[in-house]
Image: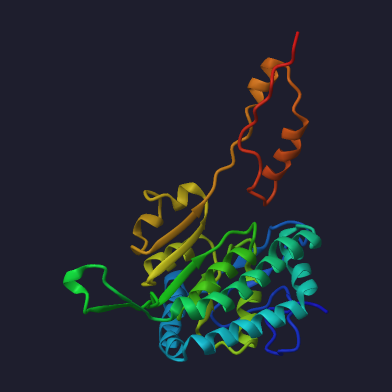
Amino acid sequence: MPIDVDSQDTGHIEIRPGARTPDQPTVHNADDAAPTNLIDRPDDPAPQRVARATARARAAQRDWLASGVDARIRVIARARRRLFERRVDVAEAISRETGKPVAEALVAEVVTVLDMLRFVERVAPEFMRTSWFSSASLALWRKRFSVAREPHGVVGVISPWNYPFMLPAGQAVSALATGNAVVLKPSELTPACGDLLANLFREAGAPAGVLEVVHGDGAVGSALVDGGVDKVFFTGSVATGSPGGEPMRRAPRALRAGTGRQRPGDRARRRRRGARCPGHRVGSLCERGPDVRGAKAGLCAERGA
C-alpha cells in the first residue's frame, strides 16, 4: 500500500511528488535513492507563511489544552495504532526520501516512534497531574503546596534530514501530550516525512492547527525562530545551533538544541604505531551517511617488537 502525504482519505497515506497545499511549497522528489528533494517556494515570503501557521497553532492550542490530558492521550493512542497498521508502508516512504534501507527505517525510526508513543501514553497523565506536598519546615508545617505543570503554548520544531520521522515525532509528541501546539519545520531535503507525521495525527483526530507543517530552507527556520513561538526544539549543525549562531541567538528563552559533530578516530596516531584496528574501522562505518553514533576516538595498543 503506498504512502500519500497529501491525501485526505483516512484509509491510506501516500507520498506523491508535486503534492501541494495552499500554504506549502510543491515537493519534487528529484532522486528516490538519495536525500536530494527540491523545494519550489510559493510566492509569499517565509515570514508570512510561518506567521499564518503560528497563528493557526496558537488559536488551536487553547481548545487542545482545555480538552484535557486524557483526550490528548486518546489521540496519541490512535496515532500509534494507525502507525503500527502501516509500519511497513511508512518505512518504505522514509526509505524513498532518505535513501536508507527499508529495514533501517523500520527499526530505527518507525519502531522507535511506536515506543515513544506508548511511553508518552503511559507517563503523561501522571506527569500532568497536580502534585501536593507538605513542607519539612516546622514554621510551615500547617501549609500545603502544589506543583502544577503548564504548557509553553506554541512549540517550534526544526528537524534534520537524517532521521526525518523519528526525531520530530519524539519532540512533537511530548509537546502535544502536555497541551502545546506544534509548528514543525522539516528539513528541505525530506519534506514529505513531516507531512506524513502531521497526517497521522490528523487522521487520529487531532484538531486542525494543533500540528502545523511549514516547508522550506534556512529562511523558514529563521522565520520560525523569530515568529513568536514560545519554545524551539532544534536539531542540526553546531554552527547554527550554538548559542552564538544564527538564528539560534534570537531564539526564545526556552530553547532545546541538539547538535552533534563527528570526529574521526586518531588515524594518524594509528599509522605512526603501525597498529591495525579492524574494530575501529567497523565502528567508524557509522560515521558515514545519516548516522551520528560512530566511534569518536580510537585507542590502539602498540604491537610488541
Say left or right for 64 vs 100.
left
Say left or right for 224 vs 107.
left
Q: Relative to 223, say whether 55 is above or below.
A: below
Rendering quarter of residue 180 = bottom left
Q: Residue furthest top?
A: 305
Q: Residue at point 74% right, 56% down?
A: 34
**Quadrant housing the N terminus:** bottom right
| Residue 299 point in image, percent of width and height | 65, 27
Q: Residue furthest right?
A: 1
Q: Residue at point 50% right, 67% down?
A: 157
- Residue 180 seen anywhere in this rendered image of the structure: no
Residue 10 versus residue 140: which sits nearer the camera? 140
Residue 55 versus residue 45: which sits nearer the camera? 55
Residue 6 versus residue 293: which sits nearer the camera? 293
| Residue 95 point in image, percent of width and height | 76, 63
Q: Relative to 200, say whether 169 is above or below.
A: above
Q: Residue furthest left?
A: 139
| Residue 232 point in image, percent of width and height | 43, 65
Residue 36 versus residue 248: which sits nearer the camera? 248
Q: Relative to 280, say whether 127 is above or below.
A: below
Q: Residue at point 52% right, 50% down?
A: 237
